[in-house]
Amino acid sequence: MRKVLAISLSALVFLSACSSDAGNDNNGPLSSVKIERGEEGTAPTIGFDKPLTADEPELERINDGDGEEVAEGQTASIRLAAVDPEKGDTLQETYTAEQGEDLVVDETLKQGNEQMYSALLGAPVGSDFAFFVPANEEAGTTGQFIVFTVTDVRDVPTRAWGSDVAPVEGSPSVTLDDDGKPTITVPKTDAPTELVVQDLKKGDGKVVEADDSVTVQYEGVKWSDGSTFDSSWSRGTPASFGLDQVIPAWTDGLAGKTVGSQVLIVAPPATAYGTTDGHELQNETLVFVVDILDAK
């Protein structure tokens, strides 16, 4: 039985990281792909010369859309179909589902898969793409073929927009610059021994699930001396990652919160890097201010 990846463009993108010069060849393996879309909310008709094979990941824009072009930092909404590259059967699709998938076209995507970043940047809404990833013996997967369409594009906020929540006495204090960048002042008291999670702003967006991927701005300081050890604000761009890829304090602290919220997290070592021998933050209690900008 074929082992097919979960129908997630994000998962396939980062499993198939490659340089921008791979694929995009009008005479290459995807040159025979035809995508014909019918009415909105219906899956497209997909045709190609079978079997579809390639030695490297291949990505082609098959049809040009006529909508707004995707710009740096925006979120592209995607509908897709996973297709059997040998027989041409549609295995799964999200064109008829209640919702599709989002990809943030930012530095994180560029570093993870420059080919996908380059393909989406400047693509008009309505464009159709074909994406083939060859078999991976180590992962136990056969060739993966996905057809996808950019159905919408929107700006990603750069800061939390929720309603202010009164601070809790004794907690680290937070002040915001004009652009939203937080400054965290740690009280001169003993660090808490249990995880602390407090809303600083309450957003009106979707509830974050423990297995979601989130896009956030964050500032992190040490309780011991108040020094900053990590900051998306300093890098100049929000960060995107799965909540199953971060320290427990983040997974537990952000799950159940709403998009648009700003959250204060105080993470004792046991909820951060306490079990990571030799880590420079192994014995540190960490303080984060996290702006939740998106979740999917």
Image (tube, rainbow, N blue to C red):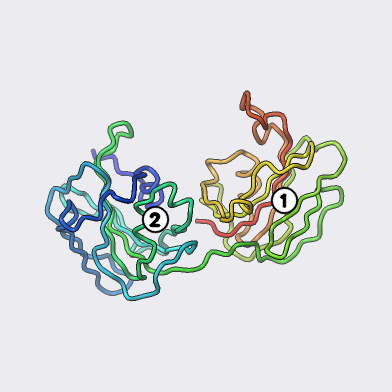
| Secondary structure under the numbered disc 2 in the rendered image | helix
> What amino acid type is highlighted by mark number 2?
Tyr
Q: Give the quadrant of residue 44.
A: bottom left
In the image, which disc is placed on residue 117?
2
Q: Quadrant of the N terminus?
A: top left
**Residue at the left extreme, as displayed:** 49
Q: Earlier in the sequence, mark 2 or mark 1?
A: 2
Q: Position of residue 10 (x, y in %)?
A: 41, 51
Q: Give the quadrant of residue 63.
A: bottom left
* Along the line of sight, the residue nearer the viewer: 88 or 235: 235
Residue sitting at 74 percent across and 42 percent down? 227
> What amino acid type is highlighted by mark number 1?
Leu
Task: Answer above or below: position of 245 versus 27.
Answer: above
The mark lying in front, picked from 2 and 1, is 2
Q: Position of residue 77 (x, y in %)?
A: 42, 64
In the figure, is residue 168 to the left or right of 65? right
Residue sitting at 17 percent across and 51 percent down? 29
Q: Residues within 10 Å of mark 2 (few under 14, many from 20)?
A: many
In the image, which disc is placed on residue 208?
none
**Residue at the top extreme, as displayed:** 277
Q: Position of residue 248 (x, y in %)?
A: 62, 39
In the figure, is residue 212 to the left or right of 256? left
Q: Position of residue 174 (x, y in %)?
A: 78, 54
In the figure, is residue 274 to the left or right of 245? right
Task: Answer above or below: position of 282 versus 90.
Answer: above
Q: Give the quadrant of residue 270.
A: top right
Proximity of marks 2 and 1: CB atoms separated by less than 8 Å: no
In the image, which disc is placed on residue 264?
1
| Secondary structure under the numbered disc 1 in the rendered image | strand
Q: Residues within 10 Å of mark 1 (few under 14, many from 20)?
A: many
| Marks 2 and 1, how far apart at CA | 32 Å
